[in-house]
Image (tube, grey):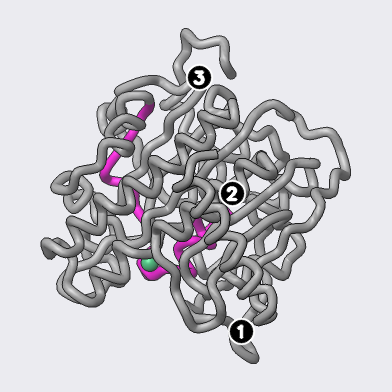
Amino acid sequence: MCQSLRMVTLLVRLVASRVLRAGAAIAFAAAVSFASPAHASHRMLVVSIDGLRPDVAMRADMPALRSLMQRGSFTFFCATTDTAVTLPSHFSMFTGVPPEKHGITYNADPKAGDALRPQWPTLFALAHRAGLSTAMSAGKSKFSVLVDTLNLDWNFVPPAGTHSVDSLVASAAVEIIRSHRPQLLFVHLPSVDVTGHAKGWGSPEQIREASGADRAMGRVLRALQKAGLIDSTRIIVSSDHGGAALGHGGLDARSHFIPWILAGPGVRQNYDLTRVPGLRVRTEDTFATSAAWLGVPIEKPVDGRAVTEAEDSTSTSR
Ligand SMILES: [Zn+2]
């Protein structure tokens, strides 16, 4: 093991143990299998770069994102939820329905009176019930609302009231991949949003941060490669909202549109989904597209749909 990798491993372990002692949300539990999944060999990685407005991605140096576009199908006109804020939008990404249905309408660490469970099953819950292992590395403590539902086998979430940085979230994800090889992994990179609130959407500081998010994502992709999992993993890279000035929210186009990139086995390569007449990809489609690839049954009707237009009809990898 090279020196830098040893240091990263040590860092993740140190952070994990510190947070564990603090009683916060890091768990490394054994995977529980209830049934044979429909597609046992299929894996899914969902990366959300918080607050990534599409034109910010265009201006930043993001070789990992661009290589996924080359390897996959994409649109920069994916619609997020009408509220365009972090936690409700991510739950729409995970449940396939808008916030008025899933019920996670708050955007902070859950407090007394907040719904702790969504009204629709999450992708994690359905995957788990189908016998797949699930994991999350998230950069904001509000994601702890997902941890206590027993649907995550491994997770990294910073202590209550805090956020992490992209490099640390990536280190935790790399460690989870290396040690546990989860079949469904969600990675949430917080720093583009944090810098947007501090310095502004489209600011030079945020452009630099988007490049940093790409380096973090690149490390996660290399970990999949090193673990021999890249050829069985479909990857979605998306976001929860954009922003303007120092904030975001609502239907303003600058908040409402997000990137959506799908790459991996059986996906049509270098294909702009805006070429498909009438196709509107929305964040709820991340749920349905992931569920279809993993072969997990959808228990309750959803609004999202699998983006089948991204399937390579000549491929045998489906
Ligand atoms: Zn956000």
Residue 277 visible, this angle: no
Task: For marks 3 and 1, give the CA distance.
Answer: 40 Å
Q: Looking at the image, do the residues carrying marks 3 and 2 touch, with CB atoms under 8 Å apart?
A: no
Mark 3: few, some, or many residues within 10 Å (few <14, many ≥20)? many
**Secondary-structure class at tag 3:** loop
Name the element at disc 2: helix
Q: Is residue 83 above or below residue 94?
A: below
Q: Which residues are magenta?
A: 72-97
Quarter holding the N terminus is top right
The image shows a total of numbered marks equal to 3
Q: Nearer the viewer, residue 234 or 293?
A: 234
- Amino acid tagged 3: Gly
Q: Which residue corresponds to mark 1? A: 114
User: In x, y percent, where is residue 145?
Assistant: 62, 72
Q: Where does label 2 land, which residue? A: 175
Q: Amino acid at mark 1?
A: Asp
Label 2 sits on what residue type? Glu
Instruction: Give the secondary structure at mark 1.
Output: loop
Q: Which residue is painted at 38% across and 70% down in the image?
A: 85
Does the numbered disc 3 mark a residue whose Cβ is under 8 Å from ligand 1? Answer: no
Q: CA distance from mark 3 to mark 2?
A: 27 Å
Say if 15 sits above or below 132 in the image.
below
Point out which mark residue 300 bears: none
Sequence-wise first label, 1 or 2: 1
Q: Residue at x 48, y 26 (%)?
A: 264
In-front residue for pair 247/156: 156
